[in-house]
């Protein structure tokens, strides 16, 4: 099974993403902020991380950089954010984001983003 860590500070969005992933057959671990996300990343060693970028405390980009430093194997990061400017997307990619999804998104967008990374379980 592929495990996906979802880091999103908005409860409704976090629950929606988690539900979409479960329907897609993925194991889901969730966190409400970057700090908790990093702790859960170390504990659960997920195959993929989906993170919001704008969160209190540790931002999604800071989380992405921390994950890239910690990971012993490549763990792709999907940014799921309302920041939809091209500059934001390019900056995210420079920080290590593998897939940049903008809100609003559909179930298909989420599942396709994870599938596009071709991670095995």
Image: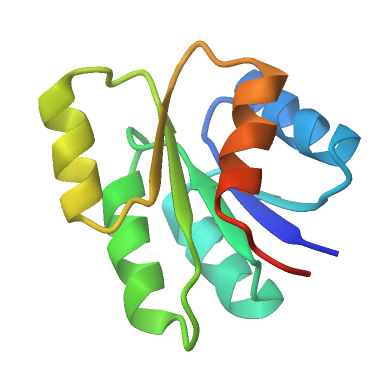
- Location of residue 15 (image quadrant): top right
The residue at the far left in this view is 87
- Location of residue 45 (image quadrant): bottom right
Where does the image place residue 85, in percent across and percent down from the top left? 18, 18
Q: Residue at x 89, y 33 (%)?
A: 23
Location of the N terminus (image quadrant): bottom right
| Colour logic | rainbow
Q: Residue at x 69, y 22 (%)?
A: 108
Front residue of this view, candidates 1 and 68: 1
Where does the image place residue 9, in percent across and percent down from the top left? 52, 34
Q: Give left or right: position of 87 versus 30.
A: left
Location of the C terminus (image quadrant): bottom right
Count of labels in the image: 0
**Is 7 located above or below residue 108 in the figure?**
below
Q: Residue at x 63, y 31 (%)?
A: 110
The residue at the far top in this view is 104
Where does the image place residue 47, in percent across and percent down from the top left? 64, 66
Where does the image place residue 114, in percent across and percent down from the top left? 62, 45
Front residue of this view, candidates 39 and 28: 28
Q: Give left or right: position of 87 versus 64.
A: left
Q: Give left or right: position of 68 versus 91.
A: right
Q: Residue at x 17, y 30 (%)?
A: 88
The residue at the far bottom in this view is 72
Front residue of this view, candidates 50 and 120: 120
């Amino acid at each position: 099974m592929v495990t996906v860590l979802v880091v999103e500070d908005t409860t409704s969005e976090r629950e929606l993403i988690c539900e979409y992933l479960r329907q897609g057959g993925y194991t889901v671990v969730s966190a409400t902020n970057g700090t908790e996300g990093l702790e859960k990343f170390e504990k659960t060693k997920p195959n993929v991380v989906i993170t919001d970028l704008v969160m209190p405390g540790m931002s999604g980009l800071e989380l992405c950089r921390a994950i890239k430093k910690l990971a012993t194997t490549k763990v792709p990061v999907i940014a799921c954010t309302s920041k939809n400017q091209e500059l934001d997307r390019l900056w995210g990619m420079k920080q290590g984001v593998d897939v940049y999804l903008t809100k609003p998104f559909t179930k298909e967008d989420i599942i396709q983003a994870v599938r596009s990374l071709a991670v095995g379980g």
